[in-house]
Image (cartoon, helix red, strand yellow):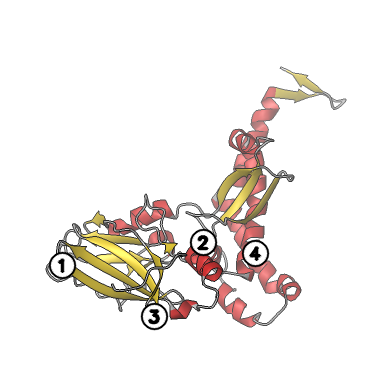
Amino acid sequence: MPFLNFTNRINITCNDELRSDIRIYASSLNNKYYVFQENLEKIKSEVKKFFPNINNNEIKIFVEAYRDAYRKEVQWGTLENPITDKIEFFNKKVTEAKDIDRDLDQIDATTSRFRVVMVNGEKNIATSEGFRPFVIKTKDEIKKIEKLVNRSLIGVYEMDMEEMYNNDFHNEAPFYGLPVIYLNKKLGIKDDMNSDSRIRSLIFSSSFKELLRKSFVNPDNKYKNRLLDYAQNFNDRIDWKKLQDELDGSNLSEIYESSDLQEFLDNATEGYISERNFFEKYLEEKRKMETENFIGEDGNEIED
């Protein structure tokens, strides 16, 4: 790969404890490899910062598979339109991208090393260190591993803040763009959530709806899309992608006032609360507290 080096070259994280921009799996049965590069938002953000005059569709993605003296180079599309395998939501099946050359000729995919490079002409925009693939037997095993990577719809982080809690999208690696609930660290709200399911139920149910609303307005990464796809399971009448097309060109106020969007959010939130048994957990915790503290007719607590 005869590309020129750059001072602001961006680092691509691959197969790093399952917390990566790109992940590669290799089968020991058929010598095929599989690639997942659906979370490139961090790379795009850094490209915008360090190379503002270069468009994402002008940056090509290459992978080099090598072992000893053997080398094979394959293009994986562009940063704007990467070629990637995918897993349907709820991990039902792995869909292979048709345009990926998976034939590594005489080398064993499971023992070879890979390196990913993103280039614009002869300029090296981003690169990874050499890394080994995750070894599997069948591609169905990928679903189990990816499920661990993508197990959380919403993350939880503690931080110093003035509010008791807030919600937004994470702006740091490795989970760049993940919908998160930020909790006041000084107040120890995370510990309160863990010890009192009523607090957890209230915070998660309200945050889910707001994060879903924000994701609909700007679904610019796989985490937001995953949240919206999850919400789709509770909406038969409204398809969120079609609704987006219908609201294309509307201002933020018009989008928020859409009755179809409100219905979509309400149905999804109701389904989310039901699926996670938040009502039952709230009532169970309430009954537990009532057995510990009896309330007198005058409203004062009477300790056991």
Q: Is residue 301 shown above or below 258?
A: above
Q: Earlier in the sequence, mark 1 or mark 2?
A: 1
Tell me where residue 136 appears, x and y as whole percent.
24, 56
Q: Earlier in the sequence, mark 3 or mark 2?
A: 3
- Mark 4 → mark 2, Cα distance in angstroms: 12 Å
Q: Nearer the viewer, mark 3 or mark 2?
A: 3
Look at 63% across and 48% down and name the residue there: 182
Q: Nearer the viewer, mark 4 or mark 1?
A: 1
Look at 55% across and 53% down and name the residue there: 154
Q: Nearer the viewer, residue 25 or 276?
A: 25
- Mark 3 → mark 2, Cα distance in angstroms: 31 Å
Q: Return the residue at label 2.
A: 223
Q: Nearer the viewer, mark 1 or mark 2?
A: 1
Q: Nearer the viewer, residue 75 or 273?
A: 75
Kind of residue sitting beneath label 3: Gly
Tell me where residue 294 appears, x and y as whole percent.
75, 23
Counting the numbered discs, the total is 4
Q: What kind of element bears circle 3?
A: loop
- Mark 4 → mark 3, Cα distance in angstroms: 36 Å
Kind of residue sitting beneath label 4: Lys
Q: Nearer the viewer, mark 4 or mark 3?
A: 3
Q: Return the residue at label 1.
A: 70
- Mark 3 → mark 1, Cα distance in angstroms: 24 Å
Q: Is residue 207 shown above or below 24?
A: above
Q: What kind of element bears circle 2?
A: helix
Q: Earlier in the sequence, mark 4 or mark 2?
A: 4
Labels 3 and 1 touching (C-beta < 8 A): no
Residue 231 in sight here: yes
